Image: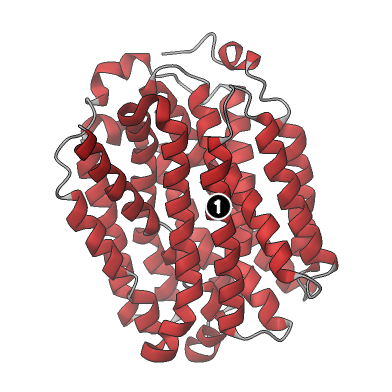
Amino acid sequence: MKRENNLLLAALVLAGLNMRPLMTSVSPLLGQLRQSIGLSPLAASLLPAVPMMMMGAIALISAPLMQRFAVRRLLLGGLLLLLLALVSRLFVTDGRWLVLTAVPGGAGIGIVQMSMPGLIRQRFGSRSAGVTGLWAAALMGGGGIGAAISPWLSAHSGWQGALSSWALPVVLAILLWLFITTTPPAARTEAAEMPSLWRKTRAWTLALSFGLVNGGYAICVAWLPDFYHQLGWSAQAGGSLLGMMIGCQVTGALLLPLLARGRDRRPLLLLTLVMQFSGMLGFLFAPQLAPWLWAGIAGFGLGGAFPLALVLALDHLEQPQAGARLVAFMQGVGFIIAGSMPFIAGQLHAFTGHFTSVWGLQAAITLLLIGLNLRFHPRSYQRSFSRVNR
């Protein structure tokens, strides 16, 4: 069993590493894409927005998918869709087709992401918080690698080669998951215990919080390198800054869930939000003074918030599959909200001509999140789902 769990952890990490390069590999190359294929501001806004919205759409239809297909088949299917999207970028010649590749890529990522929390909860039980942190760290770490290396790859193989080269680690992940032969018990036996969430206020507030936090991540992924490029930085330097920021996200995702000893997740969640707020204020008022500090602080906060939000949702319901349904709903609505944020930020930048409004918007949203997360006291968990419609 230990060997099987170690193999499962390795497959989980490798899958996580492939969840973000589809998005983060693009943002450091926006200047080159504008020159090469005339990428419009609208298309640039849609490139990070479309995958996140697809993740949300897939999560919202996760219940029938998880009841009909085994987890391993879902994971392999999602990875194959992602592989198709990345390989197709080798043949893209204009911005519209580049945006279209984000559709199957986002769907594939969404399928993998909707399957993983329930699998972690079932297979690792009391260790699920730490393993969720490991999953989130791998997910974010892959994003950082994609941002940092893509400018270098573009210099050696062109932007098409750089964007499509991220198909190679997806192939490795598929091969490893082919060796995973043991899966958790089928979810069908617990189907009757799963709650209907559409009329539950707490489900919506969890989704709103999750979506706005990930919206901050999406805005940084989409626009941080371009922001500093407009301040005179090179594409490589902007990509490295984003890569370092995501490296701090990995650290936050690994460390903060390990500190979550009690059931009350609010102190750590509030810490992550204060750090995000501080980073956004740095980008807003003193972007050139200490950019690596602002990126590191914001990244650590964003990274820690992601797994804590997943664990918070799982805490609300005792049964693993019911918790997985809540997480799927939270991610579904949340990623649609998150996907709209870089689009809104891009249009705000196009309207105002500068990024000050973007960082000001995200700082205000973070203050809203601090107020919202104060409501998530453990005593409210059972009350929030006390009368569940089945």
Outermost residue, front direction? 2
Residue placed furthest toward the top: 387
Q: Can the viewer see residue 24?
A: yes
Q: Residue at x 25, y 57 (%)?
A: 173
Number of marks in the rendered image = 1
Closest to the observer: 159 or 344? 159
Q: Could you tell me the amino acid type at mark 1?
A: Thr
Q: Is residue 11 above or below residue 325?
A: below
User: Which residue is depicted at the point 39% across and 45% down?
Assistant: 113
| Closer-to-camera residue (247/314) | 247
Give percent across and percent down for residue 96. Answer: 44, 75
Splitting the image into 4 quarters, where does residue 373 fall?
Answer: top right
Left or right: where 25 falls relative to 280: left
Q: Quadrant of residue 321?
A: top left
Percent position (x, y) of residue 251? 55, 52
Viewer-closest of 306 and 83: 306
Q: Quadrant of the C terminus?
A: top left
Query: Pointer 1: residues within 10 angstroms few (<14), some, or many (20+)?
Result: many
Task: State left or right for residue 2 relative to residue 25.
Answer: left
- Tag 1 secondary structure: helix
Q: Which residue is mark 1?
A: 251
* Residue 42 position (above or below residue 126): below
Residue 63 visible here: no
At 50% from the left and 71% from the top, the residue drawn is: 147
Q: How is the image coloured?
A: secondary structure
> Horizontal and vertical percent for residue 146?
45, 69
The image quadrant where one finds the N terminus is top left
